[in-house]
């Protein structure tokens, strides 16, 4: 039997998410580059001077990649990579199309809005697996079944069959969402609400996401973590099947924003989170340290963050 070992979860998950993101966004030349991983992990929380230094470093990293692709295009023997560098090159005109400074800042920006938030959701999900171990065999059975049905490979179709895992992650997002208020807007004209109150021009408004998440009239037993809450809601009626997915956005599900400005990357993030958690559940047992409860979240303004120094015990199942 393998030994339990302690792991400080968030820093490890942050680097893992950066690498997974990088394989899609910046391609094979950069996704395992240590300098790039460090920048994409820390760009979001850096001070302004550090951000400017990161922009220059990113430019230098992208310069040979862009130059190589330009030369291959001119040679007529160019197999276009399927990554975000090339997506941007297809979208933008010169001079940005082949400007390494533009591409460096763009990719750092993509990472800033995706790496940290995804890592936070995975970290909180692992905290909850350790805190509520009764869900582990339920989720493991579903993961094993989907793996078997898909021939050992996870596809977009097979991932959609992990409905209990989807529910567990969505309940984690409800209980420990990274934002306590979402859907920020600025009034460009006076707005009269249905109760007669007026929002003046220039007013910043938010949706109170946490208040919604813990409203018992919306979520019965709202203070209780119920990992199958949304799985059971999806089974209630055929109309509810697609209403309570992790990526769903409604007036009572605001963590990804709402309407046409809802997070456009939430489907990618959803698959990424479930892939990493499925691998973790398959390969490891997790538990809290003896005598300790679930690591407490940290609050900063409207941000609710998993404790970056919290330690969870892992043990290999093989």
Image (cartoon, rainbow, N blue to C red):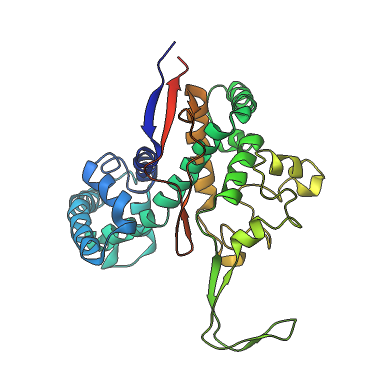
Q: Residue at x 47, y 27 (%)?
A: 290
Q: In the rendered view of the protein, which quadrant contains the C terminus?
A: top left
Q: Residue at x 48, y 34 (%)?
A: 292
Q: Against 317, is 241 above or below?
A: below
Q: Is residue 93 left or right of residue 207?
A: left
Q: Is residue 76 visible?
A: no
Q: Find the residue positioned furthest to the front.
A: 291
Q: Measured from the top left, where is residue 66 in percent x and y? A: 23, 53
Q: Residue at x 75, y 45 (%)?
A: 233
Residue in the foreground of this view, choosing between 143 and 305: 305
Q: Is residue 21 visible?
A: yes
Q: Measured from the top left, where is residue 42 in percent x and y? A: 30, 52
Residue in the foreground of this view, choosing between 183 and 209: 209
Q: Against 26, is 88 above or below?
A: below
Q: Find the residue positioned furthest to the right.
A: 237
Q: Measured from the top left, where is residue 128 in percent x and y? A: 55, 37
Residue in the foreground of this view, choosing between 315 and 160: 315
């Amino acid at each position: 039997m393998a030994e339990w070992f302690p792991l400080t979860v968030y820093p490890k998950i942050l680097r893992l998410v950066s690498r997974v993101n990088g394989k899609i966004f910046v391609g094979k030349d950069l996704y395992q580059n240590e300098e790039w991983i460090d920048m994409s992990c820390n760009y979001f929380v850096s001070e302004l001077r550090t951000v400017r230094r990161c922009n220059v470093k990113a430019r230098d990293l992208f310069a040979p990649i862009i130059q190589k692709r330009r030369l291959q295009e001119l040679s007529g023997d160019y197999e276009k990579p399927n990554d975000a560098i090339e997506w941007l090159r297809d979208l933008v005109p010169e001079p940005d199309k082949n400007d390494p400074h533009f591409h460096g800042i763009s990719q750092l920006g993509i990472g800033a809005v995706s790496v940290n938030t995804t890592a936070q959701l995975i970290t909180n999900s692992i905290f909850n697996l350790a805190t509520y171990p009764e869900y582990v065999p339920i989720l493991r059975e579903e993961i094993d079944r989907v793996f078997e049905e898909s021939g050992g490979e996870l596809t977009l179709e097979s991932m959609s069959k992990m409905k209990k895992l989807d529910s567990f992650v969505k309940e984690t997002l409800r209980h420990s969402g990274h934002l306590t208020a979402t859907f920020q807007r600025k009034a460009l004209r006076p707005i009269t609400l249905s109760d007669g109150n007026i929002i003046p021009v220039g007013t910043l408004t938010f949706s109170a996401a946490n208040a919604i998440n813990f409203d018992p009239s919306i979520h019965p037993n709202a203070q209780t973590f119920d990992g199958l809450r949304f799985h059971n809601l999806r089974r209630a009626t055929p109309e509810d099947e697609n209403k309570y997915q992790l990526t769903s956005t409604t007036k009572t599900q605001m963590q990804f924003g709402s309407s046409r400005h809802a997070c456009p990357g939430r489907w990618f993030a959803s698959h990424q989170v479930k892939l990493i958690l499925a691998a973790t559940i398959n390969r490891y047992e997790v538990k809290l340290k003896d005598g300790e409860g679930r690591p407490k979240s940290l609050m900063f303004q409207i941000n609710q963050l998993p404790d970056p120094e919290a330690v969870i015990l892992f043990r290999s199942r093989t």
